[in-house]
Image: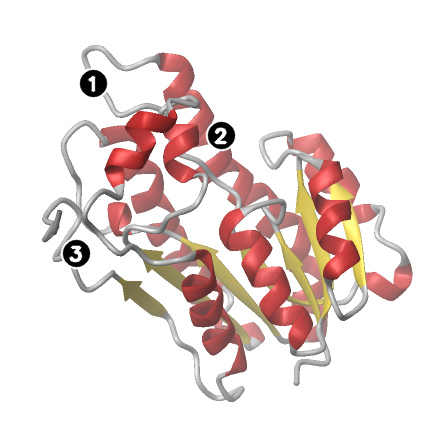
Amino acid sequence: MIDKIVLITGASSGIGWATAEAFSKQGAKVILCGRREHKLKELAQILPSTSYILNFDVRDKKAVFSAIESLPKSWKKISILINNAGNAHGLDPVQTASLEDWEAMIDSNVKGLLYVTKAVLPVMIEAQKGHIINLGSIAGKEVYPNGSVYCSSKYAVDAFSQGLRIDLNTFGIRVGCIHPGMVETEFSNVRFKGNVERAQKVYQGVKPLTAEDIANAILYMALAPEHINVADMLILPTQQANAYILNRKN
């Protein structure tokens, strides 16, 4: 059981939603963060443990710090931070890619993760303990065609996680990063801007990972004994060899 307060960004869908369920079933008090308040309320109603909703966009620096600061005293002692919020926008070569897509990915995947981490850190440093788990991607290990900026954003998550682990070592704070391969969530629908047909083709002939698979991996990291830090984890579906080689069976 986990008798701790866990803050999860991007909790309104996919991996964030599944992670909230996984931790709640373990008895954790869960802070649900996301942009879609109605979805967070829907999630809160089905969780078996106590939860608290923070409705904000990680890209908004002021909103991030204001939301974390607004937590009631009984919710301020966050023990586990799961930086899950992030998106992919577009799948285009550099020469034709949209600048707006680039900015959206950098703002959410990188800057948003930095903002939330910075806002939560003082509590962990004061306690001289804590656990930060960042959601990276296989795209942060290998670059694939037309994914230059998305991959760059996930490489940044990996690098930041490594640097964070060094900087926080003297405080007893664990830092881990989990890198999923193909996971079937809203990811491709967002990347292709609601083009459902194109999104569905991504998973054609493949049994991808599920949000629950990644949630269970995150839970595994968190449940490791205090003297163990699972620092880095790459998880792929069996049919995926690397970022762009898949054994598709039609």
Q: Which quarter shows the N terminus?
A: bottom right
The front one of 153 and 47 is 47
Q: Which amino acid does label 1 sit on?
A: Val
Q: Work out whether 200 lies above or below 224.
A: above
Residue type (three-letter) at the residue carrying disc 2: Asp
Q: Position of residue 231 (x, y in %)?
A: 37, 71
Q: Which amino acid does label 3 sit on?
A: Gln
Spatial CA distance of label 2 from label 1 is 18 Å
Q: Name the residue under label 3.
A: 240
Q: Nearer the viewer's eye, disc 3 or disc 1?
A: 3
* Residue of label 1: 94
Q: Between label 3 and label 2, give the one nearer the viewer.
A: 3
Q: Is mark 1 on a helix, strand or loop?
A: loop
- For marks 2 and 1 on the same chain, the one whose residue lies earlier in the sequence: 1
> SS at mark 3?
loop
Pointer 2: what residue?
107
Residue beneath the point at 73% across and 57% down: 31
Q: Can you give x and y, in whole percent of width and height, for residue 148 in the image?
A: 22, 30
Task: Residue 132: give x, y in percent of width and height.
Answer: 53, 64
Q: Which numbered disc, 3 or 1, marks the residue that appears first in the sequence?
A: 1
Q: Name the residue at 61% across, 49% down.
A: 11
Query: Residue at position x 72%, y 33% from top?
Result: 63
**Disc 3 versus disc 1: distance between alpha carbons?**
25 Å
Which sits in the foreground, 191 or 139? 191
* Vertical arrangement, residue 149 with respect to residue 245, above or below: above
Packing grade of label 3 (10 A; few <14, some 14-19, many >=20) is some
Q: Can residue 215 be seen in this view?
A: yes
x and y, in percent, of residue 111 in the image: 50, 36
Judged left or right of residue 41, residue 137 is: left
Name the quadrant containing residue 18.
Answer: bottom right
Q: Is residue 44 left or right of residue 128?
A: right
**Residue at the extreme right:** 73
